[in-house]
């Protein structure tokens, strides 16, 4: 943690987390020295034409009006009608489809992997942008090719006025900090905390930016999801009760004592740390696009896995799959794509890392059984499956 990292401009992970993470922006020149984009603009456009790939097109001067937003999949006609400036293509979760892009996430291992969301890739000719805006999550903006000018402002609250009548949340007013106005070259990177106003405009042809975003569920999402999870665990016999009921001065009045009984019931049922951990692990490992996890046509068997590993096969974590684990006095739970399973601690640590899944994992208790189950459900893949 105390080792200086080129990725963070010479800061250690410890310094970055203490001084910048969720606090203030950081410009990092040469975060990825001699960086070459693992993806071409044509390849990105090809992804945007595929079914089930989340893609958007923003035209500052569209045929239907300013700041026209369109959703994919697109086709060749879409791109052929576009001019030579002032539009942006954005493709979500490119790391789920391109292994070389997914490998970039390994550089951000100083942040828990379950906090990572995906890598969005944007392409824009000169002038292309999506307007000044804010995000509700942390993001690292890596310049992959070309140049983009980033102007950064201050912290914006949720009541800040946005331009009405369009499908984008563009700020009506954007004040730039004169000291935070930079043009990024390939390999440069800008970190932005949540709710910091920013505006990025392409300065050249073939401007591509990789946005490494992080999951930050809202309080509404957390409360709703946890309540749903706990509701499935609770007995039907656990109900509101008022054995201490006393006669009131009006039959229609909700007495303070009744409200306190409800509060006590909620606190008793929700304040369960073990259940909270079980829910949170499942929630934070849910796949961004569940349809991407393709179950095997036939169940995979443990002896099949064991034989394959002994023959030198190395299993792969399916692109887009999420792994995490939790340890407490009850044992270790491995969380994978929204599910949880009891697991030996060493095996859980191995699977939730980037370590190769090879013959060495067979030394862990019941490894082949668990790997067979994960292959069956699609969270793990045989070599080459992700490329099909």
Image (spheres, rainbow, N blue to C red):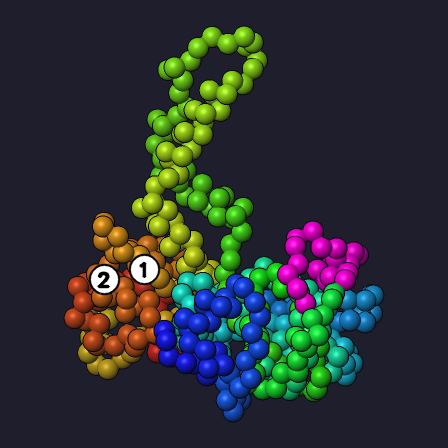
Q: Residue at image x 43%, y 81%?
A: 5
- Magenta residues span 153-173
Residue 158 sits inside the magenta stretch: yes
Quarter of the image that includes the C terminus: bottom left
Q: Nearer the viewer, residue 362 or 199?
A: 199
Figure quadrant of residue 55: bottom right
Distance from Cα at disc 2 to Cα at disc 1: 9 Å
Figure quadrant of residue 262: top left
Q: Residue at image x 52%, y 91%?
A: 34
Residue 37 placed where, x, y %? 54, 86
Residue 85 placed where, x, y %? 76, 81
Residue picked out by circle 1:
325
Residue 274 placed where, x, y %? 31, 46
Relative to 194, 380 lies left or right: left
Asked whether residue 99 is in view, the answer is no
Q: Which mark is residue 107?
A: none
- Asked if 211 appears above or below 348 in the picture, the reply is below
Residue picked out by circle 2:
345
Asked whether residue 163 is in view, the answer is yes
| Mark 1 neighbour class, 10 Å CA radius: few under 14, some 14 to 19, many 20 or more | many
Query: Which element carries disc 2, helix, strand or loop?
Result: helix
In this rendering, the count of numbered labels is 2
Quarter of the image that includes the N terminus: bottom left
- Tell me which label, 2 or 1, sits earlier in the chain: 1
Q: Residue at image x 41%, y 43%?
A: 229
Q: Nearer the viewer, residue 257 or 375?
A: 257
Query: Do tag 2 and tag 1 residues touch (Cβ < 8 Å)?
Result: yes
Q: Nearer the viewer, residue 251 or 25?
A: 25
Query: Which element carries disc 1, helix, strand or loop?
Result: strand
Residue 196 sits inside the magenta stretch: no
Figure quadrant of residue 28: bottom right
């Amino acid at each position: 943690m105390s080792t200086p990292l080129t990725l963070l401009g010479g800061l250690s992970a410890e310094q970055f987390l203490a001084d910048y993470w969720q606090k203030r922006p950081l410009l990092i020149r040469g975060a990825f020295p001699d960086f070459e984009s693992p993806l071409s603009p044509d390849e990105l456009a090809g992804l945007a034409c595929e079914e089930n790939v989340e893609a958007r097109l923003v035209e500052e001067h569209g045929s239907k009006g300013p700041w026209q937003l369109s959703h994919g999949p697109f086709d060749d006609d879409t791109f052929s009608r576009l001019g030579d400036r002032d539009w942006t293509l954005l493709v979500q979760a490119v790391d789920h489809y391109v292994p070389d892009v997914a490998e970039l996430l390994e550089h951000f291992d100083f942040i828990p992997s379950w906090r990572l969301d995906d890598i969005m890739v944007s392409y824009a000719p000169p002038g292309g942008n999506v307007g000044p805006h804010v995000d509700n999550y942390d993001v690292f903006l890596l310049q992959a090719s070309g140049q983009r000018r980033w102007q950064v402002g201050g912290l914006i609250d949720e009541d800040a006025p946005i331009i009405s009548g369009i499908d984008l949340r563009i700020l009506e007013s954007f004040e730039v900090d004169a000291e935070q106005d930079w043009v990024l070259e390939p390999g440069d990177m800008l970190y932005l905390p949540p709710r910091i106003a920013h505006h990025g405009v392409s300065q050249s042809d073939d401007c591509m930016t990789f946005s490494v975003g992080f999951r930050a569920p809202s309080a509404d999402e957390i409360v709703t999801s946890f309540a749903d999870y706990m509701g499935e665990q609770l007995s039907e016999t656990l109900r509101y009760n008022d054995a201490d009921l006393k006669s009131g001065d009006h039959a229609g009045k909700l007495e303070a004592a009744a409200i306190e009984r409800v509060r006590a019931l909620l606190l008793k049922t929700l304040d369960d740390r073990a259940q909270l951990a079980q829910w949170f692990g499942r929630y934070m490992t849910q796949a961004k696009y569940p349809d991407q996890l393709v179950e095997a046509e036939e169940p995979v068997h443990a002896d099949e896995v064991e034989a394959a590993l002994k023959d030198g096969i190395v299993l792969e974590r399916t692109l887009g799959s999420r792994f995490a684990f939790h340890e407490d006095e009850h044992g270790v739970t491995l969380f994978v794509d929204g599910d949880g399973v009891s697991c030996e601690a060493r095996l859980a640590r191995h699977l939730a890392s980037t370590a190769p899944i090879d013959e060495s994992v067979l030394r862990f208790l019941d490894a082949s059984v668990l790997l067979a189950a994960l292959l069956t459900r699609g969270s793990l893949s045989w070599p080459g499956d992700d490329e099909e």
